[in-house]
Image (tube, grey):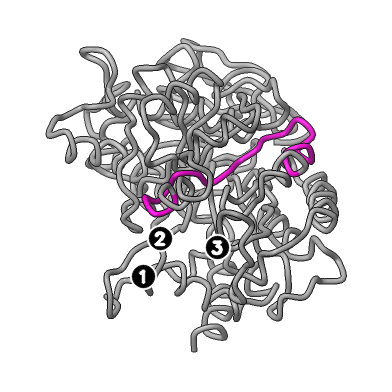
Amino acid sequence: MSGEACGLWLESALLPGGWARHVRITGQDGTILSVEAEVEAADADERLAVGIPGLPNLHSHAFQRAIAGLTERRGPSADSFWTWRELMYRFVERLDPDQLEAITTLAFAEMLEAGFTRVGEFHYLHQDKSGLPFADPGELSARVAAAAAESGIALTLLPTFYAHGGFGALEPSIRQCRFVTDLERFARIVESCQKAARQLPGGNVGVAPHSLRAVAPEELPAVVALAAGGPVHIHIAEQIREVEDCVAWCGRRPIEHLFETMSVDDKWCLVHATHATQEELECIAAAGAVVGLCPITEASLGDGVFPAPELQALRGRLGIGTDSNVLIDAAAELRVLEYSQRLTRRARNVLAGDSGHSTGRSLFDAALAGGSQALRGEGLRAPVGLAPGAPLDLVSLDAKHPALIERRQDELLDSWVFAAGRTVIDCVWRAGEKVVSAGRHRRREAIVARYQRAVKALLG
């Protein structure tokens, strides 16, 4: 929606204040101008049944979409995150810039089809296949931005600083050569990312110190300073071995060490934090930081189960991401988050909150608020959801889908999350542009054809 103001009319929509009927939303230049409830549609309005805000995907490694399904064969020893990582490294060694862009574009298109309208791309591929810098240090970051432009998704680009192979500034392995950089070169990468993001509607840039095992304590403040007030994301406490290695190195657990050495605040996103203690959860909640959960990937890699009810009890903040992109489905991420709690606690509706509350609604609200904070949207103070001044990012649900028949209000979210998933998504608007219709991205055929050529060249 650019130029003249245009309108959408919905029989039912989830607004910041709750569900409303007969809602008219007008937008211009990608931004919501007005939201009215209990009104009639204008003649030119597009009429829809059910509308909800698009969700933020706060943590993605888009290139990993191409290895989904290829790491499910048992190795000669016990498989874990660390054996999966070796397989991923082998794939990375062959990936060229055109292939990276093709794979990333498909992943971003599928995110839109699944109900995500903004992605935080935790981007750590910086060098060429031999580990040498490109002439433009932001060559591969620019390819991620190009994929966002082609797909239409909003992008928070998170260039990743990766300098070491383990705690104590260990030398990186040869297989990490495409990730490794120094502070001077990383500053040029961030500058290149900022230039690329300025060309995108709603583009935003933060920084991502990869992890405490890949960033030395003396480097971390300099990396964070490059965020210039933008978001800061870090992998932390994802694996038991990571926690044990950190204790062996410095006598502190990763989250404990981070809070002792850095001023963590509401601009930080702690990705995974799977093995956080109660004391560490209290620090995270008090700081106002967001925990970035990726339930499908965490289950795929055997990470463990994050203590989400304990964070919820502290009024802590969380969001969801797709991480390895083994399966891209916003509803499925929320479902796995809740179901993992049910399995480990032998209870139902664990994350619903108070008695009588909808689990789907509770999960959705948390993911919308936490993800929006972690990715910072269009400006630090932009409203969240379907409200005037917010980007017109809207997902319409197919009310005729069998899973939604005779469902109303929060029952719609419960049925989307627990009974249907992405199959109920009809249309998606990003910044007022309809990028998905009848569940399919508007450029799906061309994007898939390019992806197919890339994967055949890589794996054929």
Q: Are marks 3 and 2 in contact (CB under 8 Å)?
A: no
Residue 14 picture location, percent across and down: 44, 22
Up the image or down, 165 lies above or below 354; here it is: below
Q: Are marks 1 and 2 in contact (CB under 8 Å)?
A: yes
Query: Could you tell me which quadrant the N terminus lies in?
Result: top right
Residue 106, numbered label: 3
Residue 69, numbered label: 1
Residue visible at 27% across and 22% down in the picture: 352
Q: CA distance from mark 3 to mark 1?
A: 16 Å
Badge nearest the viewer, 3 or 2:
2
Q: Are marks 3 and 1 in contact (CB under 8 Å)?
A: no
Label 1 packing within 10 angstroms: few (<14), some (14-19), many (20+): few
Q: Can residue 240 be seen in the rendering of this structure?
A: yes
Badge nearest the viewer, 3 or 1:
1
Q: Is residue 351 left or right of residue 1?
A: left
Residue 19 picture location, percent across and down: 40, 16
For marks 1 and 2, the one nearer the N-term is 1
Residue visible at 36% across and 26% down in the picture: 278
Badge 3 marks a residue whose secondary structure is helix
Q: Is residue 307 left or right of residue 123?
A: left
> What segment carries the magenta color?
223-242
For marks 3 and 1, the one nearer the N-term is 1
Question: How many numbered marks appear?
Answer: 3
Label 3 packing within 10 angstroms: few (<14), some (14-19), many (20+): many
Q: Indicate the amino acid at tag 3.
A: Leu
For marks 3 and 2, the one nearer the N-term is 3
